[in-house]
Image: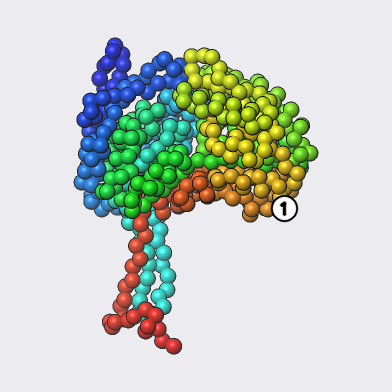
Amino acid sequence: MLVVKEKRGTMKEFGLYINGKWTPSTSKKTFPTINPAKKNQVLAQCAAGTREDVEKAVYAAEKALPAWKKMPAPRRGEVLLEVASLLKKRKQKLGELVTTEMGKVLKEGLGDVQEAIDIFEYMAGEGRRLFGHTTPSELKNKFCCTIRQPIGVVGLITPWNFPFAIPAWKLAPALICGNTIVFKPSSDTPLCAIELIKILEEAGIPPGVVNMVTGSGEDVGTSIITHKRIQGLSFTGSRETGEFIARQSGLKKVGLELGGKNAIIIMDDADLDLALEGVLWGAFGTTGQRCTACSRVIIHKNVQKEFEEKLLARVKKLKLGSGLDPKTDVGPLIAHRAILKTHMYTEIGKKEGAKLLCGGYSVKSSGFFYAPTIFTNVKPHMRIAREEIFGPTLSILKANDLKEAIQICNSIEYGLSSSMYTQNINNAFRAIERIEAGITYVNASTIGAEVHLPFGGVKATGNGTREAGWTGIEEFSEEKTIYIDYSGKLQKAQIDIEE
């Protein structure tokens, strides 16, 4: 059972999870997790892990690795399937926890949990695949194939914006491949991670296979990144941290997903009402706190005015509030620092000469609320059109034709998600071919990844890794090549080929 201490009346205190046991940090220190819709409401105190705690977790993962690796992959899949089943049974309660701790509206909180269900179900099935390849040899009486093997002990570092989905996207493939894990969740959403670990434990994960150390990036994150006995690392978060990981992680197998500055292109033949729904969902869903959020609309000059009028009318009707309120459209930002960052970009946009259509201010209330913000007359060189804000801010840029629209879309350093609204199939396929992004949607928003397909981007979005789907297996396994020579003699490839 979870270590829970009563503190200051009804305050709960949660520990680390190492080697199948809940334990306090060696520092004896804790940190608070709060409700961003009610910033004075402390939900719990969580253990502030240390380098020593990471060392304990790595040791436990090493000890558990041989048995977990040896367990047949279909049996590991049964454990993952049980995780999915438990998540299903508790979806409503867990979705409410996501909304309470992270802030997104309840339907999105439930969607967050559903993504975790989906990926555990999908990866459970991979236990009966984990496909390798067979191929003919260039020599007689020789067999060639590849097999998949686990990396070993892997470190997982996850963000707060999808506190069930993103940890699940990493945990499920890492586990089905036979790895053991040291997991550091975001300090903004540790309660969601704790509930996920409790479910893994209940589903039958053996002690030491999954270890969780909560705490700061400086103490816990850096210790995982630089640890010489952690062979693999998967990180989702900021570009700056990703660059630090690339410099400090050594020769680990590293996967990085580092954000985006995603665009929706709207052509003059587009269904504007459909595009409007996509922009609203993409820009202001999750309060803009998604790596796939639409932060740029690149629109054909012939329909810009009409679309802006439609968009402005809808945005002004959006209701801010607690995500638990069914009338709420937009929840809070995660913390005060997010308000400061979002407003900093509002001021930058105004100084750069963009026209503020609406929003641009924090909302005085009990939580971290910022009004949905739209800029028009934005130019491609402006910072608000190039830098990831991670808040409810949308920039509108004009394009004269498809060629210019794609040029603007590609003019940034990121390349995660993209979208094109058009009724012209030629436009759609030109966009698919020419847009520099890992994901392109046609007549849909930039948001909505499915777990059986690869997820990731190009350029500064990461280091080329793709998560989920079959590429999730590739991220968390090593491919070993096998040669079996049954000729009964020494054969030398390239040398002994018969002419």
Quadrant of the drawing holding the N terminus = top left
- Number of residues whose C-alpha sits closer than 10 Å to that of mark 1, classed few (under 14), some (14–19) or many (20 or more): few
Q: Position of residue 310 (x, y in %)?
A: 72, 28
Q: Is residue 494 visible?
A: yes
For the residue labelled by badge 1, is the local secondary structure a helix, a strand or a loop? helix
Q: Quadrant of residue 420?
A: top right
Horizontally, is 46 left or right of 262 in the view?
left
Quadrant of the drawing holding the C terminus = bottom left
The foreground one among 55 and 337 is: 337
Horizontally, is 111 left or right of 50 in the view?
right
Q: Quadrant of residue 38?
A: top left
Horizontally, is 139 left or right of 291 in the view?
left
Residue that extends furthest to the right in the rendered view of this protein: 302
The three-letter code of the residue at mark 1 reads: Asn
Residue at image point 49% right, 20% down: 368
Q: Is residue 236 visible?
A: no
The foreground one among 247 and 405 is: 247
Residue that extends furthest to the top in the rendered view of this protein: 9
Q: Position of residue 226 (x, y in %)?
A: 31, 45
The foreground one among 315 and 84 is: 315
Residue at image point 22% right, 33% down: 21
The image's colouring method is rainbow
State whether residue 431 is above or below residue 109: below
Q: Position of residue 161 (x, y in %)?
A: 46, 32
State whether residue 418 is above or below residue 348: below
Residue at image point 45% right, 34% down: 162
Residue at image point 61% right, 23% down: 360
Figure disc tally: 1
Q: Position of residue 328 (x, y in %)?
A: 56, 20
Q: Which residue is mark 1?
A: 426
Horizontally, is 406 left or right of 196 in the view?
right
Residue that extends furthest to the bottom in the rendered view of this protein: 499
